[in-house]
Amino acid sequence: MVFSSLIFVFLFFASNILTQLFIKDTRKKNIVMLGFSLVFYAWAGIRYLPLLLGMTFICWFFALRIDESENVKQRKLLLGVCTGICLLILAIFKYTGFFLTELKLFTGVPEVIPQVVLPIGISFYTFQLISYVIDVYRGQTAPQSKYWLLLLYSSLFHQCIAGPIVRYSDINEDIMRRRTASFEFSKGITRFAIGLAKKAVLANGCAAVADKFFAADNVSGSPALGIWLGAFAYMLQIYLDFSAYSDMAIGMGLMSGLHYKENFNYPYAAVSVTDFWRRWHISLSSFFRDYVYIPLGGNRCSGQRQIMNLLAVWFLTGLWHGASWNYIFWGLYYFVFLVIEKFIWTGYDKIRVPLRRLMVLAVVFFGWVIFRFENLSTLGAALRGMLCLNHNSFSDLSVSLEFKNNIFFLIFCVVAVTPAGKYIKKIFAGISRENTAALWIYTVIDALIPVALLIVSMMALSGNSYNPFLYFRF
Amino acid sequence: MDKEKFKKTALLGYKLKRVIFLAFIVIVGFIGILWFARPKTSEIEKRELTKFPKLTISGLLDGSFFTGIDTWYSDTFPLREGLISKYHSLQSHYGIRSSQIIAASPEPEETAGADNTESVPESQTDPDELLREGLGDVNASAEHVGAIYIAGGSGYGIYSYGERNTRRYADIVSSLADKLSGKANVYSLVAPISAGIMLADDVRESIGCDDEGKAIDNIISMMSGSVRSVNVYHALKRHNSEYIFFRTDHHWTSLGAYYSYREFCKVKGIAPHEISDFKTMEFDGFLGTFYQQSNRNSALGNNPDTVTAYIPNDTNNMVFYSKKDGGYSKYEWKVIYDVSSYPKSELYSCFAGSDQPYSYCHNPNITDGSSILVVKDSYGNAFIPFLIDHYEHIHWIDYRYYRSYAAAQGKVANVSALVEQEGIKDVLLLNNINFTGASKTLDNLSNLYS
């Protein structure tokens, strides 16, 4: 079940939120929430459920042992074993096929590469559980003595399959005791509805434009401008899609009294590549920062060592996104730009901000082209095609029509990825404080907007058989 | 404004928002669980909607059972049709949509020129069903195209010329003509599709549609001397300011078929009837295959067609055989059938009993024993009514379905056997140009013509 489906919104979530509203006791709330979350997870196939239950059990068990132990060495060992098991499981399910394919390429064995199906959300909940165990080890959080409550954390349907990667320490308090302020519930509604519409209407609409030029293996025949247009639409799609899932998660959390941290902060308004990664998928980059980069020495070591640390982090960031070379290249691509920014082009900060923004967007744009194509020869064809090197035409009617047919929509999406909406809301909120009539109008409109967005999303979800889910790879 | 008042209004606002939101998802959620209100078929998409999945252990384990529920839930959502049409009107504001190229949605049954086509489903309309439900065969996929060009409220299919298949088509037709030489005259009529007739050459080229006039010339030049070719391209081109092709459907109109019929008469050497000689029936609001395959494009939806049908002067009675309960049954029918109670997507079915494996009409006003067999796809349907006044016996078969019909009747499933058995003197092979390049059509025809 994906968030952007009618059955999720009107059956699953509707009944979930009603139970959360009517049950007053937090313990009972948690039991019901766990039930919903397990059903949600099992919806992708019951056979994956034991994995989630098992990994949570291992981390629950080891965290308690680590907490009990006074012996530094033993604690380290326990931590090592636990994270080792988690990473091994992740590696087996996510990277076996990739690794064996490469191995076969060089050695000829194994003859048959086993097809391992990637359990949904494994990359997200593995990282959540690892962060939990490390935090316990570091004494930053107390261990959870009840298995089922830790399971609630790892399986919570709001963020289990598409993020954000929530830290246990951030929601532990909320899990144990929570009440929903009516202000927050209201905020949550709007946030959820915006997320749903962003995904169902905007992201899916951009996906349709992108796929027109990126369909299957047909890229080499696409006219150059078509590939540029497709990449542009894909750039919009991936942000709108991903941030929409985080919006919905944050919104549902607010409605249930759970506070998740922001996962995106208008990344396409970044002024440097470093800044971009502070704004893009924040829960992932901060995970790598806190659990890989800083433990390796972070910034507080020699330049050479710092570069090695960055290399490790960006190799892993790439690999986390999928078991394929293009993701690794994508990670390393950012590594190169970050090194340039940090060590080589030190005068970068002196360039005017709008120009810097444009440069970041260009870097990100080509980054997404690399990210888009798992098949390296298709990636090569796309990159060559952008420069007319495939003997492809520069443009044709299908490109100009596709552009004209969607021009207002694309402009709307461009505006939607900027903070413009936030500012507009601020302005109206300011005006509404001036007199009673304005306040009433603002209040009523604010109350109606979520339902209006739900209706538009329903239309899009009924009419659009095209509803891609981008996170199967993660 | 004082703080207290602001706070109060804000709190009221939060409550209001919560009530509206919860009421909305609960009401829609409630409508969603009304299983009896869920539609089972989509008239516009001509298909059965997704059924509730069967419960299996493996389906539970790998999640396919649940995915099935997801699909079922959204596909048969009670408010679906209305929501979809609203969504399409929303999308019409996404940009300047006066012209568009759209990938046709249901997998086409046979595609233009391409040498790798899918098989043709042997599904036909059960006429009883049609009458009862007022619905066409929901399983039957429409004939046609990979992409649709939409401009000025009209749809156009795209034709690609393929040398290999075109030659094969010419060879297959030639071999039949050679075989029947001395027994029956074989006429070949390749019907162009609208793009080649209605669009200016530069527009047609810019959408990647090959020149149909040249293609038809090529087909004719490749055929043996025993084939009497009827080239209707130029006649249609001359009349392209008239309503000779539908806007929302890939077929020609009756008028388009009529101008082609005049060309046939020229080749055969008979005098055609004037269009004013016929009484007509009219069905409006037609939204045909382009409309469905473009996922209900609103430019087309706002521009529905009118089907005008010309009733033969001598008789409007015919019979056909169609699949029923595993066998074939005979139906008394009308050459021009009143389809005003049919869904708006089905109005082209008014002609000649639509796509039936075998149909026949006896003209009681002619007693000279003259006879014709038309081997056709759906383009033939609008054409056949004009032939009725010229022959005593008019037979027509749809080459896509005839073979299984013949096999079920214990007959030899080929054209020459039928010609011999019925003593037929004229054979007209009428195909739309897209099908002359489709491998599956060619396989079908070569079996039928062998």
Image: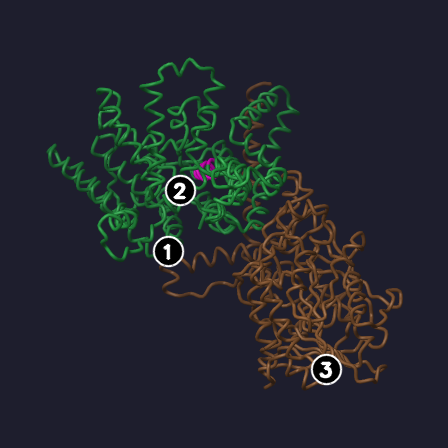
Chain colours: A green, B brown
Mark pair 3, 1: CA separation: 62 Å
Q: CA distance from mark 2 to mark 3?
A: 69 Å
Which residue sits at x=76%, y=80%? B371
Look at the numbered disc 2 and give the secondary structure of its residue. Answer: loop
In the rendered structure, the answer to whether residue B20 lies left or right of residue A169 reads right
Q: Which percent across, then down, holds residue A149? A: 30, 43
Asked whether residue A53 appears in the rendered view, the answer is no
In the drawing, what numbered circle is on residue A162? 2
The answer to which image quadrant residue B275 occupies is bottom right
Looking at the image, which residue sits at the far right? B277
> Tag 3, which secondary structure?
loop
Range shown magenta: A239-249
Q: Amino acid at mark 3?
A: Ile
Residues at discs 2 and 3 both on one chain: no
Compare residues A458 and A451 and report the one nearer the observer.
A458
Q: Quadrant of the C terminus of chain B?
A: bottom right
Q: Residues within 10 Å of mark 2 (few under 14, many from 20)?
A: many
Majority SS type along the magenta span: helix
Q: Quadrant of residue B316?
A: bottom right
Give the structural element (helix, strand or loop) at label 1. loop
Q: Which mark is residue A405?
A: none
Residue A245 painted magenta:
yes
Dot 3, crowdedness within 10 Å: few (<14), some or many (≥20)? many
In the rendered image, is residue B258 in sight?
Answer: yes
- Give the labeled residue for mark 3: B424
Give percent across and percent down for residue A293: 26, 28
**Residue plotted at (36% across, 63% down):** B58
Mark pair 2, 1: CA separation: 16 Å
